[in-house]
Amino acid sequence: MSTLHLSSSQDTWKCCLNGTNEFPVTSLRQHIFKQSQSLPSSNYKWNNLLPSKVNITTWRISIQRLPTHINLDKRNVNLDSVRCPICDDALKTEQHVFVSCNLAGKIWKDILNWWNIKNSVVSTFDDAINLAGKVTIKALHIKFFDAVVQTTLWLLSRYQNEFVFSAKRPKIELLLNDVKSFSFQLDYE
């Protein structure tokens, strides 16, 4: 309190990010990304075939800002456990939820089989996020396959939440059917 100086003049706000005292959103965005500890590994591309909530979820996954147990624990949120509630084999990180968990591994194999994509595997977190850009399919189909990939990520996230917060356990065997049906709907509920 000793450094506090009160004044009778009117309060004002100044933005000192770009030296002009203006507040451009781009300066704030650049400042946030510079201060962030986990920058996106690649530039996320919005897919206009999908609802905003799916795009936003994928973007949050790509910058590791989804409230996984590990991310919550880093922010001092007290949890009973930071382990995956589905398999209890590992810590609940983005890598585990979207790649390493048995559930994720099975769904990625099913997706690749459904699209008849050979010689591709999802073994890292970046593989999952950037799968549409790494597979060999016709250029005309890449945007549609990306919609399937993002839908899969969104549904894996939703499945995890339902598993934790719902009294009724979601059925693993219906996950691929959900990916197929949601991928071709215009609006997800």
Image (cartoon, rainbow, N blue to C red):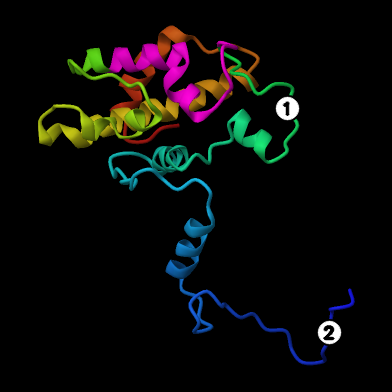
Q: Amino acid at mark 2?
A: His
Q: According to the image, label 1 marks what residue?
A: 79
Residue 100 is one of the magenta-drawn residues = yes
Give the residue drawn at x 29%, y 45%: 48
Q: Which residues are magenta?
A: 87-111
The residue positioned farthest toward the right in the image shown: 2
Q: Alpha-carbon neighbours of circle 2 within 10 Å: few (<14), some, or many (≥20)?
A: few
Mark toward the start of the polypeptide (2 vs 1): 2
Give the residue drawn at x 34%, y 45%: 44
Is residue 150 found left or right of 166 in the rendered image?
left
Along the viewing direction, whichever of 169 and 120 lies nearer the viewer:
120
Q: Amino acid at mark 1?
A: Leu
Residue 43: horizontal and vertical position, in percent? 33, 48
Q: According to the image, label 2 marks what residue?
A: 5
Residue 140: horizontal and vertical position, in percent? 11, 35
Asked if 115 appears above or below 59 in the picture, the reply is: above
Please tell me in which quadrant of the rendered image residue 52 appears. top left
Asked if 130 appears above or below 156 in the picture, the reply is: below
Give the residue drawn at x 61%, y 16%: 85
